[in-house]
Image (spheres, rainbow, N blue to C red):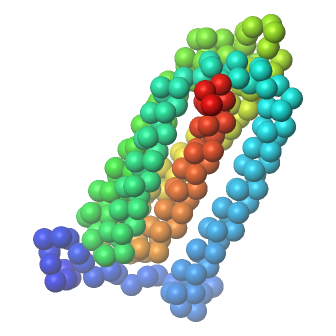
């Protein structure tokens, strides 16, 4: 049943389905949020280890890392940073719309968030293709100035591992966001503010990881 103002699309939320292992809905929501925070903590440790290894390698090969960083595509990297930050804005707006119970707006904002995530993916895959063209892919096709070849190989190893893992995480986030968008549009139960907030936590984590990757990979020789 539509609530006070149908013009803004606000509706009464359907009752949250409570799983058998929980006594009440608040307990289920709390467990879901706690589970997401624990998962994100493990992801922080995982990426933290990669950043620590990167820091050690950069100390060992400072000149090679600077030379290799010049071969990253600063235009595409900066564009993707702007795309991802914009997606975070729309995710925040979607979380607010979900909190207000405005399902249509929630769905539209989540779709925009997902589309920006897909745009990021397309740009990154284009960048990978350019890297392959320029012989910068370790194992498959790598050629670099012999003076810096060893360190550059390490740099691009980190580049592909970290950005590849980030892209996998982003793809998972896209799946979550677009699934919630569909459920919100169709008015499915359990698409409440708490669920959208949990998806938002994951999305923002993915964005934060990129904010650290961007200067480490693209700005080494430009700072």
Q: In which quarter of the image is residue 131?
A: top right
Q: Confirm whether residue 20 shows in the render.
A: no
For the residue pair 121 and 155, the one nearer the viewer reads as 155
Give the percent coordinates (x, y) of residue 143.
Answer: 73, 9
Q: How many labels does the image show?
A: 0
Give the percent coordinates (x, y) of residue 157.
Answer: 75, 28
Give the percent coordinates (x, y) of residue 135.
Answer: 66, 11
Q: Could you tell me which quadrant the C terminus lies in?
A: top right
Q: Which residue is drawn at 39% across and 55% down?
A: 89
Residue 59 lies left or right of residue 122; in this view the side is right
Q: Which residue lies furthest to the front in this view?
A: 223
Q: Which residue is drawn at 81% across and 21% down?
A: 151
Q: Could you tell me which quadrant the N terminus lies in?
A: bottom left
Q: Which residue is drawn at 73% across and 32% down?
A: 158
For the residue pair 45 and 108, the one nearer the viewer reads as 45
Q: Quadrant of residue 190?
A: bottom left
**Can you say whether 71 is above or below 125 in the image?**
above
Q: Residue at x 41, y 74 (%)?
A: 193
Q: Confirm whether residue 86 shows in the render.
A: yes
For the residue pair 66 and 181, the one nearer the viewer reads as 66
Give the percent coordinates (x, y) of residue 194.
Answer: 47, 75
């Amino acid at each position: 049943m539509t609530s006070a103002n149908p013009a803004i699309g606000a509706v009464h939320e359907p009752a949250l389905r409570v799983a058998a292992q929980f006594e009440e809905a608040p307990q289920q929501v709390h467990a879901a949020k706690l589970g997401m925070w624990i998962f994100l903590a493990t992801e922080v440790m995982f990426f933290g280890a990669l950043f620590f290894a990167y820091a050690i390698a950069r100390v060992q090969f400072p000149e090679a890392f600077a030379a290799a960083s010049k071969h990253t595509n600063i235009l595409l990297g900066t564009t993707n940073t702007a795309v991802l930050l914009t997606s975070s804005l729309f995710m925040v707006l979607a979380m607010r719309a979900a909190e207000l119970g405005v399902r249509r707006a929630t769905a539209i904002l989540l779709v925009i968030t997902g589309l920006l995530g897909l745009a990021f993916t397309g740009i990154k895959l284009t960048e990978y293709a350019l890297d392959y063209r320029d012989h910068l892919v370790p194992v498959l096709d790598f050629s670099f100035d012999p003076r810096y070849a060893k360190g550059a190989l390490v740099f691009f190893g980190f580049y592909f591992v970290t950005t590849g893992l980030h892209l996998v995480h982003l793809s998972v986030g896209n799946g979550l966001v677009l699934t919630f968008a569909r459920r919100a549009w169709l008015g499915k139960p359990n698409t409440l503010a708490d669920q959208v907030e949990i998806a938002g936590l994951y999305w923002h984590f993915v964005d934060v990881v990129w904010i650290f990757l961007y200067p480490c990979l693209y700005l080494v020789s430009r700072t």
